[in-house]
Amino acid sequence: DQQDQCPGFHVESIYQPAEEVGGDFFQQIADGRGGILIVVGDVSGKGLPAAMLVSVLVGAIRAEAARGTSPASLLCSLNDRMMGRSHGGFTTCLAAHISATGLLTLANAGHLPPYLNGEEIGVPGALPLGIVAKAAYETTTVQLTPGSRLAFVSDGVVEAQSRSGELFGFDRTRDLSLQPAAQIAETARLF
């Protein structure tokens, strides 16, 4: 899927729900200044309730992106929207902005950290969205160089299970993170 391509960046994405409609979401939005905003997340649960929350979140992400909101502020806004809507579930979310000069700014609400050139980026832990009112999100910045490869994944990759119940796990996910998106998804599916 090649949506909203942004000059200077090559983005690949693949979405393969395990069974019915899942709660994973992904948005990439050019910032109008040569940079790109990428937001990935996961609403717990499946089917229509999860899909409805995803549509609320995607609308909010688009609105905040149009205002040029920073990743941490974006998560604060999404957290406010999710208060009282989770119904005992949770929503993880990772927001990343890459400037035209390659400065990566990340903020995380309980989602899996991304991989940069095959290594996990250490990001501070934080609760998922909608659990604590007025949550604050720390920012991590990393300078990317031309040709850097960032991989964002959902728990569907890490938690893929073999017939014997073995999890795909973090080590295999890290080792795969340099591969194209379609190959990461297919390898986890085949596992």
Image (cartoon, rainbow, N blue to C red):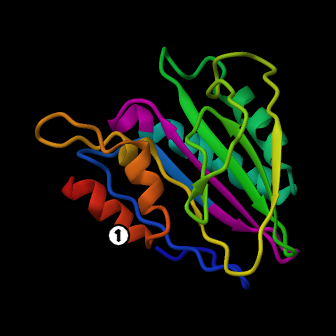
Q: Mark 1: which secondary structure?
A: helix
Residue 91 position (above or below residue 149): above
What residue is at 37 percent from the left and 49 percent from the top?
Answer: 157
Q: Nearer the viewer, residue 17 or 100?
A: 100
Residue 72 in which image quadrant: top right
**Residue 96 location (% of width, % of height):** 72, 54
Residue 147 position (above or below residue 153): below
What residue is at 79 percent from the left and 50 percent from the top?
Answer: 64
Mark 1, Cα crowd under 10 Å, few <14 / some 14-19 / many 20+, is some
Q: The residue under label 1 is which amino acid type?
A: Gln
What residue is at 55 percent from the left and 56 percent from the top?
Answer: 152
Q: Nearer the viewer, residue 91 or 109?
A: 109
Residue wearing tag 1: 183
The verdict on residue 133 being magenta is no
Q: Nearer the viewer, residue 119 or 9?
A: 119
Q: Which residues are magenta?
A: 28-50
The outermost residue toward the left is: 163
